[in-house]
Amino acid sequence: MISSLLVIVDHLIMKEKIKDMHRKIKYYTSSLLLIVALVSCESFFEKDPYDSTKKEDIITNEKDAQTLLYGMYAGFKSSASYGTYLTVLTDIMTDASLASAGFTNQMGDLYAWKINPGTSEVGAVWSNHYASIYNTNYILNGIDEIEGDVDNINRLKGEALAGRALLHYNLVRLYGKAYNATTSATDLGVPYITNNDITSPSRHTVAEVYKYIVDDLEDAEVLLQDNMYYDNMVFTKDFVKGLMARVLLDMKNYDGAIAYATQLIESPSYALSEGLGFINMWLHDSGSEIIWRVGYSPTDYGAAPGYNFYNRNNSNTLPLPDYIPAEWWVNSFNPSLDVRYTSYLTYTQTGFGWTGHLIRKYPTNPAYTSQGLNMPKPMRLAEMYLIRAEAHAYNNTDDLARDDINELLSKRIIDFTGISLSGDDLKEYIADERKRELMFEGFYWFDLKRMGKGFERVPQANTSTANDLQIAADDYRWQWPIPTSELNGNENIEQNAGY
């Protein structure tokens, strides 16, 4: 038997203050510990994370529900969530990034596609997400039994539903096959957990998981009020609409994706950033383009998504990057006209003795001291333009797709005059624009998977391990394996093919 694996998720408690219909969230330095034991003979679901507390006592009032909700949000800060893996790791796994000649092998197994059920990152993401799902379910299964302010209870339920949908969405895209209307009714997805009493769940199909995601989002949209204030560190009705647009694009429901993306594009709450405003969005983690960001503060922050692109402890030392950008991605920008070149890249000397391009999408917010520490921004208005453009292109309304791309690029490229492409050329251009705009935000690996594309890394100077890796579109490793701990403790769980 292998030794027990104890996963401790530090959920830092925040306090909510409601005044004059405005919610202001601040973070306490005290913490809520959600402890989930994953052992060789127990699956995740067999261990009750609150087994020292009677279930009926976990949520007795609105404050208890809010504390559980803070725990859910805290989980997103972890390196096993948007803190690192969901923001940069998946894109590091592609041809967009190569390991430097001196890299420390952090995330090296996933980068080299040496993936197996015991790979640490594979188990960490599974554990992190289902721990947060536990929090959402305790809210949703218990909140109807308490008395309180109806609007606030609806908000708590709505945010929990949105969180449960997002968490399962992340899991099914990693551990299941991409949504395919022809095969999704039989393709294995992940357990969609809505009741914490289930101890040995089997896997739902991909079609079932997507249906439950849509159901949860539709319920959340009803419960959450229209945004009366600008708070992009919690799940709002706008976030729900954005996630719905993303989900429906996966499902090739282009009309639905267009409808939801349009609501955000036309909302007065958001506007595309440009020029210095765009640069400051990445440096200071604020701006009119952000729909949802993972809420860090100087006293309560999570993992540093940009650390491995510099790998240094302070700004006074030369960087020792673990991963550097592929030349093809660097060369896809016009360095003198495209603001993204200035915001996403730097050309500098390294501690390895060579000078070259490094990724600086996470340049370190001046409010923090840890290098590469910026708030992950999992949803921005730019993505909504790209979703709508892609949906229009596949709906054969090329003129509308061009309008969206032209509007986006008018905010990114000086003196941009527009494109006139159509058909397959336009579709390819939109896919390339997603690479330029969204790289190292956790989209490219998923785009390759949903579009049925493989990749091939091209060796370049100052790189080493797996710099010529080729991964075919049908490689079984596009589906991460079910973790060893889950397999050992859950007789109903089925492993993915190939492992």
Image (spheres, rainbow, N blue to C red):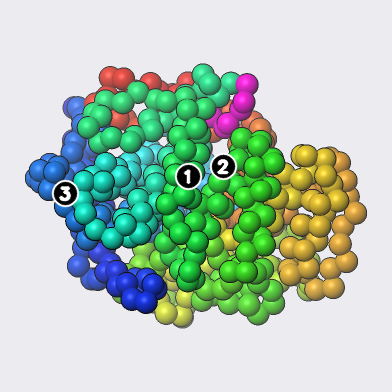
Which of disc 1 and disc 2 is earlier in sequence? 1
Q: Residues within 10 Å of mark 2 (few under 14, many from 20)?
A: many
Q: Amino acid at mark 3?
A: Ile
Question: Residue placed at 55% from the left, 46% from the top?
Answer: 244
Q: Which residue is mark 3?
A: 58
Question: Residue placed at 44% from the left, 55% from the top?
Answer: 224
Quadrant in which the N terminus appears: top left
Question: Residue placed at 50% from the left, 61% from the top?
Answer: 226
Q: Is 432 contained in the magenta span?
A: no
Stretch in magenta:
174-182
Q: Is 176 contained in the magenta span?
A: yes
Q: Is residue 428 above or below residue 235?
A: above
Q: Which residue is mark 1?
A: 217
Quadrant in which the C terminus appears: top left
Question: Pointers 2 and 3 in contact (CB under 8 A)?
Answer: no
Which element type, helix, strand or loop, lies under badge 1?
helix
Residue 197 shown left or right of residue 280 in the figure: left
Q: Residues within 10 Å of mark 3 (few under 14, many from 20)?
A: some
Which of disc 3 and disc 2 is earlier in sequence? 3
Q: Which mark is residue 247?
A: 2
Residue 36 visible? The answer is: yes
Q: Amino acid at mark 2?
A: Val
Which element type, helix, strand or loop, lies under badge 3?
helix
Q: Residues within 10 Å of mark 1 (few under 14, many from 20)?
A: many
Residue 128 shown left or right of residue 382 in the figure: left
Residue 24 picture location, percent across and down: 36, 73
**Magenta highlight: main SS:** loop
